[in-house]
Image: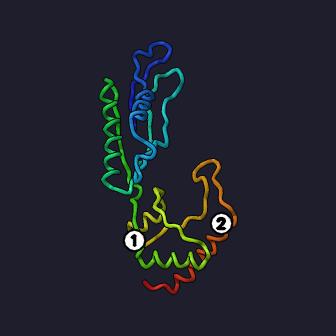
Amino acid sequence: MVIQGIPAHAGIEPEKGLSAIRMASEIISSIHDGRIDEDTTANIGKIRGGTATNVVPREVVIEGEVRSHIPGRLKEIKDSIFSTGKAVAEKYQGSRVEITENEEYRGYTIDESDPFFRFLLEKFTEAGIPPKVISTGGGSDANIFNRRGIRAINIATGMEMVHSREEYIHVQDLIKVTGLLVAAAVGFAAYDE
């Protein structure tokens, strides 16, 4: 969202301005974000704007994302965010909100009866790693491959505290998953769906 306000000198005539930062904060504080429900999340991840402390900010750009395993729910939350942005802009004369969207990837599901899925489970068992099958809100190349008809399944590496400043992985887990991947690659050469 690009939020347009009205610039003015903040010390001489701030009343002639309309702060795009204030508008952005009103939009952000009015939308649902974080974990919306079991299948859906939303996040405002970037915000930038303003030019100087003595200028009522003319423009702010906020960037965010919505993820859901349910396409209709994703659209519902996205539409709610967009309509909130437009409603805030309509409240202030001289303001404007421009909204663009981009679909980076779609979610995918692979049935547990799928032969490739069963093949990978077998490789986990052979490697002595108890498989734990979960659904996540993460995104990866597997989303792109599956959308293009190429079966791909993410295998976790044992990362802990993902995307935080404290993210780590135990070397032992990295060695285990490397062994698993080598065994899967060797086994895949003989794999026949």
Q: Can you say which quadrant of the picture contains the N terminus?
A: top left
Distance in Å between CA atoms under marks 1 and 2: 26 Å
- Say which of 105 and 187 sits in front: 187
* Residue 91, horizontal then vertical, whole percent: 31, 26
Tag 2: amino acid: Asp
12 with respect to 4 (left or right): right
The label on residue 111 is: 1
In this orientation, does residue 135 appear? yes
Q: Residues within 10 Å of mark 1 (few under 14, many from 20)?
A: few
Compared with 11, 59 (above or below) is below
Compared with 57, 192 (above or below) is below
Residue at (41%, 55%) from the top-left corner?
104
Residue 71: quarter of image: bottom left
Compared with 192, 5 (above or below) is above
129 with respect to 63 (left or right): right
Residue under circle 2? 173
Sequence-wise first label, 1 or 2:
1
- Say which of 186 and 98 sits in front: 186
- Say which of 137 and 23 sits in front: 137
Residue at (33%, 30%) from the top-left corner?
89
Q: Are marks 1 and 2 in contact (CB under 8 Å)?
A: no
Tag 1: amino acid: Asp
